[in-house]
Each structure stands twice: as structure tokens, then as C-alpha cells.
Image (cartoon, coloured by chain):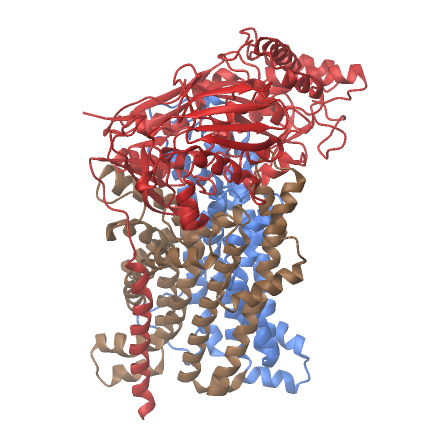
Amino acid sequence: MSRFIAGRLAQSLVSMVVVSIVVFALVRLSGDPIAIMAPPEASQADIARMRAYLGLDRSWASQYGTFISHALRGDFGTSVRFRRPAMELIAERYGATLELGGLAVLIVIVVALPVGVYAAVHRGSGLDYAARAFAALGQAVPPFWLGLLLVLVFGVLLRLLPTSGRGTPLHVLLPGITLGWFAVAGLMRLTRSAMLDTLGSEYVKLARIKGLPERTVIWRHAFKNAALPVVTFAALLFVALLNGSIIVETVFGWPGLGLLVIEAVDSRDYPIVQAVVMCLSAMYAGVNLLVDVLYAYLNPRIRYSS
Amino acid sequence: MSRSIDRRAFLRRATAAAAVLTAAPLLGPRPARAQPDRLVVALGQWGTETPFAWRHVQAEKPLWDCVYDPLITRDPKTFEYRPGLATEWKPSNELKTWTFKLRPGVRFHEGYGELTAEDVKFTVEQSHKPDSLGGSAYYFRNNLDRIDTPDRLTVVMHFKTRQWIVPSLFTQYVGYQNVISKKYFESVGEQKAAAHPIGTGPFRHVEGKQGDYHRFEAVPGHWRKMPAFKELLIRRIPEPATRLAGLRSGEIDIAQVFGDYLEQAQKAGLRIHESPNAAQYWVILTGQTTPDREDFCPQCAWVGDQKDPRSWENGRKVRLALNLAVNKKAIYSGLWKGRGGDTPYSYYYYPFHRGYSADWKVPPYDPDRAKKLLAEAGHAGGFEVRVNPYVQLVAQDGPDVMEAVALDWEKLGIKVKRVPEATSSFGPKGRLRKTNKTFSVYGSPPFDEPLAGWERVLHSKGAFNLLLDGAFDEDIDAAMREFDPARRAQLTHALGQRLYDGYHGVMLGMKSITWALGKKVGSWSTLAYVPAETNYEYVTAGS
Amino acid sequence: MSVISRPAAADAVAPRRDRRWPPRLPLAIVLLLVLCGIFAPWLAPRSPLEGSLGERLVAPFWMENARPGHPLGTDRHGRDTLSRLLYGARISIAVSLVGITLTGAVGVAVGLLAGFFGGWVDTLLMRLVDISLSLPGILIAVLLSVVFEPSFTNVIIVVVFLLWPSYARLVRGETLGIKQQDFVALARVAGCGSLTIMLRHILPNLVPSILVLATLHVGYVIVLEAALSFLGVGIPPPTPSWGVMVADGRGLIEQAWWVSILPGIAILVTVLSLNILGDWVRDRLDPKLRQV
């Protein structure tokens, strides 16, 4: 078992190194931050001087070397735009993204799981179709549009919730719903599908023959087996939500990592883009590793297959 | 088997660990809730957020202006200089020396003492730092010789050559110097001073989060103006629809609105505050530059070859056609909602400038004549152009205006390719004259004199190319060397006339900048003609 | 998907209707939309690209501010909504079709190779999937549009980048299961090469799952395209697509709801129909897979 973990750990590290190279190259290909920040009157000499000052005139290899050696210590450089350590900015903002993502995942799980299970159990019924229609709604409505609609209805017309920003628990409600909305459909369909798989299995048939109450059959036996792919999805969902959070944070003015990183790309703020992507990659690798280990732990056949 | 129990324990422990990891950052500081004594302003964005003059490029003004006082203020209606932190400013030594006398008894926030000449000297000399790339840093680095402070309230600046433009660099608009406290800056260092700046202004910074919000408090007994609101909160909300929603729900008191949002604000019962004739709009016809630049395009229909008089005249005809093809009245009513019109102008030449002429009318809408002109110039079948419908600092409705212009041009048979690109990457391309001949809509700010603007945007050595490069270099240089204001005004007028006659841009009109005001706000006297300046200390409370 | 051993073919709880043909209504809707897209130039009353400010925000025919010639109203620049909806069908369908086909090709190839060969090939390819998943897609989209100009091709690249891992993983998982089965062993004994086995024996059994995933993704792609337009890195104007139209009208939900809601309805109907069709494919063809 430990050999398996060690192997996967090594692979994760290699993945992260590759990610670091890719993002390093990508941001540098996208343009020059000095050219953007330089004011109208800056001469070529000024710009060159600024570039040297920030260390951007060295070769890519040398810059990458510095980047990696510092990154291992947790230092991702100084933001070109904010003139503060990139990690400091991320530490400041990841709480907001966590709050947003956490609520979104909670909403997704609380809504999608029961509905998915129910739709599978009562397959073909009116509720099944209703649930699938609801799922379709979740997939078909672009998050930015939904966000603005919610703001209009709950913020302006009903005056129930704040329209933007972060502050009280009420502030996170609309952004959280907007972010989670899209994923509800996916998880619901997956749950339904996984449940349908297990509900037809012999294992469940046996439980039924034993005379167990239907509720126990569904939740204690069928769902537990269906849970594994669902849990995988949910764990990775959190990381995948960063994509959606860029849009939700823009619409709601939510001070999280999504907004930070999209503006960093806009202003070619290399340190921040690199730092965010590396943190994300680490988080993703961590979650992936955890899930793989969990699978291997639960199903020994996988350990020895690769 | 003991293993199966471990699974549950493992999950439990893992959940606990996750909870701890997530709980910590959630307990961070939050902005407090809405209060009657607090003015909430929403901005779309505020640049790199630095409060220091030697670092910023105008986009930061709406955020930090309230913390500082300028040396020279302006009359809100006439734009003329008035005393600010400086009570007088006199040139001597043939304009090579400028002496500023400071106002006594002005105090910095948080007990950092009185404003002295040392602070002004310290502020300006920051421009000499190697990484200073701010608005006027370049100017001071190249032209400033030294600064003397003979007494506590006198600043004497010596320049290498004669300079008439010096006062305008210290005024309330266009590259003014936020005077910082030398003591504060040296004691806490630049990073802390940037995160929590202090100045002499009517508001003092309390706390804030970069990219999110900043909270300010009114300074009691301020020498210039005591703000009516005890607290000022400036928030950043990138999406204009959300800003409008905040205005309507009462969470936000002041925000800039334009276009359809302006209409919605009015329908919702919000008052609109207007800064009239604040921005001149024109479409930049790139390609009119010097042969050493990539954008140089004598074969482009709207440029022509300067060496061939007929080609040059054809270029002018095409440019005039592009002007005549645009239905400006439709833009005024459809997009500007009546907040702007066809006030005559000539690129940076505002009605309040000396030598202004009301003959510089915005070309009318005449598509038939436009078609004829195109045919005369040999382009009856049209040609291809590229446009970038982006949001410009002043022209926030740039995308809509550009699309309207594009649609009008297409009716002439011109093929328009839209190439969206954000300011951050398009701006530098414009400065380097490497836009691949891509047009865009520009909204201009006013300068003290048109020449100050032309020097930057019309000269081939200028940082920008917003009209054309090269053709007027000598005229601009000559006018810049003219130290007699009346004579200079004459030269400026002549140049303005030639610019107008050449139709080097597609003139659209002059537009007001509009804000929506919430119920909490009584009235607001903003600076005339200024699109990006904000002075929240002049907002009064509503009844 | 699930790595739990597959049970033998068995029915679910509710009795299944024997449907050899797909559900009629969804199929009809999808066909109708495809036809609208193909025949848009003949069906549309006007050009979707022409407009003038004098006709902006005209309301649909049943409302007060309506005008003749614009049955479904106009958008912010005076362009006809109905025409843009019809032409938008083309673009949205094109983006989905091209995008998902390319994605499928890449993802299925990777998944097949990984699942079939296992070992270091599997490890390498799955780590490639991980790397791809840790790079935020929207970021890639913005970076792409910075380096190249925004275009249809950019959108396709982003779609492929974002979606190929799902196909790779799904196909890998299923391949792992299928290759254990007897008929594969038989094929090998019969002397078939690896490529033949993969393409002739395994791949056909993957088709239902791939189809289900593909139908699920069409809606995702259209909405993704809308999100890219919102950020300014989608299909450049004035080309209409449903996503672009929704992004365009987002500030006008109260003032001119038809600009964003009409294309929104189009998207919803398409997604719903495709979901139902996808479910039918799964329900119909899955048991057959198990019976092997």
C-alpha cells in the first residue's frame, strides 16, 4: 500500500512540475507587464531599466530557476501590480473563494444527491422527468445571466439580499447559488446514473429478498455503493469550481481568487498567475491523490493493476 | 477487521482537519454594514491601486484623490487655477525657476505634523527612482535640475530649460503630485505607506483591502472643505449591471452610469449628476504615422502617400467620407441618451481654451456625399478596416459606440472586422504604433492647453498616436517654445484649424460624464470638463 | 465512471417501456433546430448583422413597443432578434458539433490507449489528464485570446481543452472493464493486433457511453461560449450565437428581456431535448453492453 502511495505521490510531483513549466511559459508568451504598466512618457531606456529592476530581462531558464527554487520555499515572487508578495495576496483572498466554493459545494450536494437518488428510485415517474428538466435548466442557464437575474429579483425588487460584495453570511448566498447551480445538474445526473447501476445489482436484490425495508435498501446498501463515484465528483468539483468562480466573482464583486487571477492575466502579473495556478494544481493533485488512495484502499485490485 | 473501523475514523479525522483549514480564513475582517453617515461609492476598477504620483497613471485618481490636496486647485466652473496647498507660484529666471509658497498650518493625518517644503521636495524627488514610471515621473526626471527649500514654506524648483508647463503638473487635474509626508514614508517604508497612505486631504484612510474596498473618514476642521459625510467607503464592482442594482437597492450612493444603465437609473427614480462636456469622442484612424513605425500605411485608403499630393488628398477625402457616414444624432439619442451633443471642437481643443473656434463643427450625417467622396477617391467598392470595440478609460461605452460606427460604415460598403482586445494588451500596442491598423473609439480628457495634450498624442516622439504622427512635429515644437501666452494661443489655434481641416479622426461629439445619485446624497459639485476626477468632499447629504 | 464490478444485466426498479425509437418530441425539436440552422439564410427575414441605432430595443410583436419587420424585436444595436436566433442556431450547433467531435476524438484516443495498454502508458496519459485539469480553462481562454485574436477557432480550442479529460477518463474506465471480458481474449487468440482489437472490438461498445457524455456536453459548450463572450474572449462581434446574444442582453433583463431570454429559451429547449435523447441512448443501449 505504501509503495502505491509513494508512487502516486511521485507522479503528482512530476505533474506539478510540468504544470509549473506550462504556466510559466504561457504567461510569458502572453506579453510584457512593463509595457502595460509603463506610463505614456516612458522612454525605451526607462522601460529597460524597469525590466532589469524586476528581473524580467534575464533568460527564461534563469527566471524559471529562480521561480522554482523560491516556490519550494513558498515564495512566489512579488506581484508586479500590487508590489506585495504574491502569496500574501493569495492568503488574503483564498478565504473568500473558500467561502464561496464551500457554499456552492454544499448546495450542490444537498440538492443533487437526494433528488438524484429519488429520480433513480422512481424512474420514469413524473418526478424523474421534473428532476431531469430541473437539471437541464441548471445546464442551460449561463451563470452570469443567472447571477444578474438573482441580483435583480432578490436584491433590487424584493430587497431581501445584498446585491454585491462580501460581509455577512447573507452576502454569500446569491453568489453561492449562482456558482453551484450549474454543477447541480451534473451531480444529479451522475447520482441518478450510479444509483440505477447499483439498484439493478444482485447485491441489492439480495437485500430486498432478505426483507429489508425499502429505505434501508436504498440508502444503506445501494447508495453506499453508488457513493464512490459521487464522492469523487464532489471532491473534484470543488477544484473545478474555480473556473466558474471567475465569472461569479466578476458579477458580484466578490473579492476572491477568481477575480484576482483574471485581472492578473489582464495585466500580465506573472507572479500572481503562476502562484494561483500552482496552488490550484497542488490542491488538485492533493485531492486526486486522496481519491486514488481511497479507491485503492477500498478496492485492492486497482493497486496492482497499474 | 480493524481496518474497516479505521475507515470511519480516518474520514472523521479528515473532516475535522478540513474544517479547521477552512474555518480560519473565513473569520477574517469584513467591511461593516450600511450606515446613514456613510457615503458609499462604487467604481468599476481603479488601476494598480498605488497612491503615489510617481507610480500611477490616472486610473488610480478616483480612489485616492480624497486623501490628498493638490498644490493648485481649479475653479469648478471655469477650470482656472486657484490656490490649493500652494498660495502662490511664480516663475523667474526666464521660466527656468518656479517658486511655490505653501499654505501654513496644514496638517497631515494621524499626527504626522505640518506640511512643509521638505515634504513637497521629497514627493517630487521620488521621480528620480529607477522604477518610477508614473505620470509625470518621466518629465521630472528629464527636466528637473534640483529643488531648494530656503524656508519651511517655500519650494524653489530649478529646471534645466525654460518650462511654462510646470504649474499644470501640480494642479488638480492631469498628473498632479500627491504630496506625501516625508516623515511617514521614511518611518513605515513604501509598501506600508502604499497600503495605508496618509496625506493632507479632507478624508483619511482607515483601512481597506486591495482590489476590494477602502474605507475613509472625514478629517474634522479641514482647511479646504469639511466633508458632509463622516465616512466614505469606496468599493470595487466590475460589472456595471451589478453597480446599478446596488444603486437601486440603496447599498451604493454614487456610481458612474452610462447608456442603457443611465436610462434604467432614471426610471428607478435615481437622480443623475452630470459633468457636462467632459469628454471629446473620436475614432482613432490608425495608420497615419511615420515610416519608421509598423502601423505606417500609405497604401491604406484613409491615409495616402504624403509624397503624392493626389494620394494625400484622396486620403483626406476618404477620412471625410468616414466622418460623414456616421449618424451622430442616433448615437446622441440612442447611446448617450441626450447627455452630449455636437459641440464644435478640434481634438483636445475645448471651448474654454484660448483660440477656440466655434467653426470647428462636427461633420454632419451625409451618407450620400460620403459615397460620392469614396468614389472620387477611387474606393467605390469599399475597403477593409479593423476595429477594436473596447472599454476605454474615459469612453466606457466604447464597445457600443464602435459597433454603431461600424454598422454605419458597412452601409457604405466598407468591410469592418471586429477584433476585440482589452486595454491591457491593446494600449501598449497603440503606444508602439503596432496595432495592425486597428481603429478604436477614444474619449479625451482636457489639458490646460491643447498643446500639452498634442505633445503627447500628436507628436511622433509622443507616447501615443491618437490622431497622426509626424506631420505637425515642427508646429508643435515651435509652439512649445513660445513663452508668450497670447502668441502661443495663436499658434495653437492655427494648428487646431489644420487638424480639423484634415479630418484626421472621425469626430463623434462631446459627451457629459454622468453619475447616478442615491437618496442619501443631496447635491454634488464636480469639476467641470473633467471625466475622471472625483471630489467626494463636495457631496452634501440629502434630506 | 464506476470501478465497482459490473453486475449482470438486470432491470431497474420500474418496468421499462420497450422503445426502439427515440422519444419523438425531443428528436423533433433537435431536428427542427438543425434545419433552422441550415436554412437560416432563407428563413431569416433580415440580415443578422445589419442594424441601426434608430431601431434599437424594439419589442416583440405582442408588446407595446413593437414595430413591423421585427417579429421578435431587436437588440441593442437594432439588429433583428429572429434573424439572429436562426443564424445563431448555426453557430451554436457548429461550435458544439466541431468542438465535441474534436474533443471526443482526442479524449477517446487517449482513454483507449491508456485503458488498453495500462502500465506506464496509462500512468503517463492519466497524469497528462491531471495536468490539463489543473490549468483553469477560463485562464487558458483569456491567454489564448491575448496571444491570438478572439475567433471561432479559439473557442473550439478552449472547448477541447476543457472537455477532453472527461472522455479520456470515461473511456479508460470502461476499457479497463471491457478488456477483461472473454470476447477480447478470444480476439487475441484469433491473432488480432492491438489496434484491431481496440477499434473493432472495444470501441463499438464504448459508443453509448460516449454518446451520453456528448449529449450532456452540448449544453455545456453553448453556455461555455456564452461565458467566454461575457469575458470578452468569445466569438467576436457581430457574429450571432445564442451565447453571444445572452451575454449581450444581460444588462437589459428588466428593460428588454427578449434580448437575452429568447436565446436563453432556445438553449434550454435544446439542452432539454438532448438530455432526454442522451438518457434514451443510455437506457436503450446500456443493457446490451452488459449482456456481452
Q: Residue furthest bottom?
A: B1
Please name the color used to draw chain C: blue
> Residue drawn 63% across and 46% down?
A49
Q: Is residue A271 above or below residue C34?
A: below
Taking depth in this image into account, of B334 and A211 the one nearest to the observer is: B334
**The C terminus of chain B appears in which quarter of the rendering?**
top left
Foreground: A169 or A270?
Answer: A270
Residue B404 visible (yes or no) = no
The residue sitting at 76% across, 26% down in the picture is B299
User: Going by the picture, which residue comes out furthest to the right?
Assistant: B308
From the rendered image, report the letter of the chain displayed in red: B
The one nearer the camera, C226 or C28, is: C226
Colour of chain A as rendered: brown
* Residue B382 image-quadrant placement: top right
Horizontal and vertical percent position of residue A173: 28, 52
Q: Residue drawn 63% across and 19% down?
A: B480
Q: Position of residue B470 (x, y in %)?
A: 71, 24
